[in-house]
Image (spheres, grey):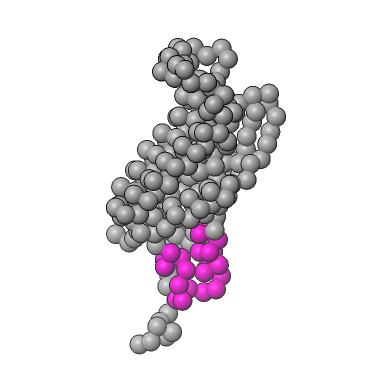
Amino acid sequence: MSQALLPPAVESPTLVGREAITLPMLFLTVAALGGVRVAQGGSLALVPPSLMSLILATVLVGALVRSRALVPGRIVNDRRRPLENSSGVVVLVTLLAATAQVFTLVTPATGLLAFVFTTFFVLLLWNTLAVQPDRRQLLRSLLVVFGGAFVLKFVVLAALYEPQGGLLRRVMLTLLEGVSLGTLGFVPDGAATGYLAFVTLGLYFVALVMLPGRRT
C-alpha cells in the first residue's frame, strides 16, 4: 500500500493536548520570562535573544534530535492533517525561541565572562554532537550545565559583585586577588531576576521532558 493511502495517524487526546497547548505555552512562557531583567534599582527591561544564542539554540535542537529526545517526524509528517502539522511546527519554533532565550538568560551580557560562557557552551555542544548521547544522558547533561551556569551567574557572581557581600564575596576576592572586577565586565541583575531565572529553567526542563521523543 502506498504511503499516500495510509490513514492519518491517530494520537491520544492527551498527546494532542500536550502538542497543541501545553508545550507551546510552556516554551512561550520560557521565552517571555527568560527575557525579563529586573535591575537592582527595580526597573524592568526586556532582553531579546542574541544572535549567538540563536546559533547555540539551533545546535542544541539538533542535539535533541540526534539523541532522540525529540523526534520531529512524530509531530510533522505526511500522514498528519495540515492543522496537526501546523501544531507540530509551532512546537519546533517555540522550542527554538525558548532555547535561545535560556542561553541568553544564563550568559553574562557583556565582558570577558560573556566570551568565556559562550566558548564553554560551544565546546560542550560540539562534544555532545560528537558523542551522540541518548535522551536520558543528554537531558541530565543539560540539567548540570544550565544549572551550573545559573549558580555561577546568579549566585556566585551576584555575591561577588554585592557591595555588602558576606563570606562568599571575601572568598572569591581572595581567589581572584590581583584581578580587577571591572576587567570581568559583569553587570549583576537584581535578586528578582535570579528568582525568575530559576522558575524559567524549571519550566524549560519540564517542557524538554515532555517533548515527543522516541517511542519506548
Q: Residue 24: percent from the left, percent from the top?
A: 54, 54
Q: Residue 99: percent from the left, percent from the top?
A: 50, 49
Q: Foreground residue, 126 or 23? A: 126
- Residue 138 in view: yes
Q: Residue at x 46, y 37 (%)?
A: 116
Residue at the far bottom in the pictured view: 1
Instruction: Tell me the quarter of the image containing the N terminus.
Output: bottom left
Q: Foreground residue, 130 or 202? A: 130
Task: Using the image, determine if residue 118 lies above or below residue 190.
Answer: below
Q: Foreground residue, 12 or 30? A: 30
- Residue 27 in view: no
Decide if residue 200 is on the left or right side of residue 138.
right
Q: Residue 14: percent from the left, percent from the top?
A: 45, 58
Decide if residue 213 is on the left or right side of residue 39.
left
Q: Residue 120 in magenta?
A: no
Magenta-drawn stretch, dominant element (helix, strand or loop): helix
Q: Residue at x 68, y 23 (%)?
A: 41
Instruction: Tell me the quarter of the image containing the C terminus.
Output: bottom left
Q: Which residues are magenta?
A: 72-92
Task: Using the image, determine if residue 159 lies above or below residue 48.
Answer: above
Residue at the far right in the pictured view: 43
Count of numbered circles in the view: 0
Q: Residue at x 56, y 29 (%)?
A: 185
Q: Residue at x 42, y 58 (%)?
A: 62
Q: Residue 128: percent from the left, percent from the top?
A: 34, 50
Task: Using the image, determine if residue 158 lies above or below residue 92.
Answer: above
Task: Using the image, determine if residue 181 lies above or below residue 48.
Answer: above
